Amino acid sequence: MEKPGRPDNFEAALTDVLRSQSQHDEMDVARIDAFARSLPGRRPARRSAGPALGLVAAIAVVASVGLVIAAGLPSRSGATSTDRPPSAAASSPFAPSAAPSKSAVVASSGLPGPEVWGTDPGINVCLRGATSEVEVLTAYSLGHASDYRNRLPSLGFQLDLEKTDPVLVVIFKGSSPVESELMILSGPTTHQPNPGTNDICIAGPDWHRRYLNVAINWSYLAGTMTPPPGSTYRVVARLPDQFEVDGTNLVWDQKQGVLWFAKVGCGGEASAVYRWDPKTAKTENWTIPGNKLTCERVKARLDDSGALWVMESSLLVRFDVTTQAVTSVRISPDGPTWGSVPVAIAADGSSVLLARANTAALTRVDASMRVSTVAIPADLAGAQGDTDLVVGDGVIYYLRDGQLLVLDANGKLEQTTDLTGRTLMVRPDGSVVLVQDAGLAIVVTPGGMAGEAVAFPSEAGTSLETDWNGHTWYVAVDGQGPVLIEVSQST
Amino acid sequence: MILDNHSESELHRRVAAAARGDGEAFGDLVRPSLSAALSMATLITGSSADGADAVQDALMSAWKSLGALRDPIAFPAWFRTHVIRAAIRHSNNRKRLRLVDLETADEGTDGGFHDQAQRARLADALGKLDPRDRAVLGLRYVAGYSTAETAVAMSIPEGTVKSRLNKAVSRLRAVYLMGEQ
């Protein structure tokens, strides 16, 4: 008999709860429909005929070329037919609009045509999943997948392409087919790239990858020009399997010139701190107290005295990186109820400050594990979502709910700025940088004003650390497991 | 006649008419998406009333900016992005945690999920997530979107979708497993 709450029931339970929480009254639909039809009149928008005519022209090209790739798809015709089964569409929230189903390759002047690549099996692989009209603009063969570095430099670093397999790069004209990874309900079947970009598919012998909104330099892709040297990405360490991209925190130790990792327990594995030395490429690790089950995202900070602090939902651990002495304090006596769960940690001298959900105070823990509080305004108590906290030059920066709050050392609110980002970092000079989703970071000041932009790897998630001297690290996962990637900026 | 889905020519015609200020054409354009939009907005905001408000906000913003839509074929995806943004904005503006009605949370099919306390905890934890996390979860687990599709719908990088998904699922799984510790 199944035990309630077994981990393998979790996804079914989550889906069930999500569905129940998305239920609504059909009367609301009718009311909103009436609202939509009664919106106040506005001046007709001036619309350019260009895009629409362009689309019509593209359809005409497809019709005139008439070369349809079967790709295992039913052959359908009729540019205006609505051929998605209504039942599937009706059952899916945000069901996609139907579109005529026809996949085609199109000759285009100046680019290799179907006579060059039309019979390559990679074409069919890349058209898999196409249930609506998709056009292949052109395709290029690369001797090795890893040639993407010079031929498609805008992809940045792609762990999946660090292979020697020969590949076909398929460039779509307009929409590209989408293969849903999770087909609980049907989702959209095509993706429309952003203006000035193309969706592409790279097919190897027994694998393929899709990349959306790729800015293509045709000279680089054709191999007639080589891009200037840019950032160098390399896998510098293969990590134990239990490392998660988002469940790990990296901390650069400027004094020792090493990188620390902290990871909270997961699936019975104990919490631990790891030390990776770039000079020797060796990793050491020490077990620390912690919950072995939660698998949650851990946060770590290195304080000025050289102690590494690791925070999970119910415990704060101090690890002396010199003596390896460990001390800890419970910070949520009732356990991880999430009601007052700690959401952020900042090093401040030889102590740390914690921000907790639903708590109108920051909690200070010093090197002797003595606890005190710094009151903050009551309306700042409800931090959720992407939250981070740092102290730079004695000023507290608190990122929460799409706002960057600047507080003085006594918790008095000095400045509030609408700024989103995923993490805050303190540079060696005490200035503070907000890393945003797109891989860009901006310098923030006590006035809340944004300053110069700094680039970071956009794929790095939250496990991102830099030595501010041209080296940045993050954890990613390839086919074999988690890896530590180092990015070196060219000068 | 209102179709469940628009054909390409209908989309062109209706978008053109709506762009000229034809409210009925705009209504026909959005009607097939309203139920799904309301589902997603309800999930993101945490209540059907807030969800309905968010969808109305999305309708207003879509109506006002229809002239900026370059490709009529993209209308459904464009509108759903408006809905998601409006729901997240609406949720952020509420500046409050969602209070979960445990009676309501216990309703519905069990689907093999027979520990109501766990279900209530999961619902409670879901309500406390960032609305953007709820949006990612809804798009993945309810709408069945892939990571790439979710990234497009939310106008965020794929890496961010993975990060949010990982974080939210880890947190919810921890809550779900609490009863076993």
Image (cartoon, rainbow, N blue to C red):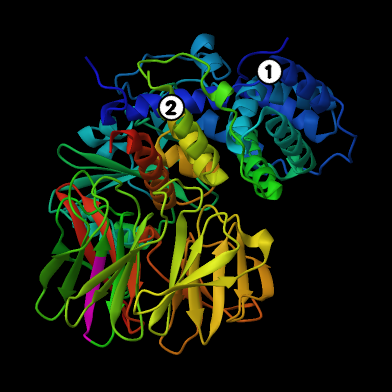
In the displayed structure, does residue A334 sit left or right of residue B40? left
Which of pointers 2 and 1 indicates the residue nearer the eye? 2
Of residues B118 and A212, the one nearer the viewer is: B118
- Label 1 resides on the chain identified as A
- Give the structural element (helix, strand or loop) at label 2: helix
In magenta segment, residue A202 = no
Q: The N terminus of chain A appears in which quarter of the rendering?
A: top left
Q: Amino acid at mark 2?
A: Ala
Q: Position of residue B157 (x, y in %)?
A: 45, 52
Name the magenta segment's main secondary structure.
strand
**Is residue A175 at all visible to an observer of this figure?**
no
**Residue stretch rendered in magenta on the structure:** A256-261
Of residues A205 and A66, the one nearer the viewer is: A205
Task: Name the mark on residue A379.
Answer: none
Distance from disc 2 to disc 1, alpha carbons, whole Å, reads: 26 Å
Within 10 Å of disc 1 (Cα), the crowding (few <14, some 14-19, many 20+) is few
**Circle 2 sits on which residue?**
B117
**Circle 1 sits on which residue?**
A25
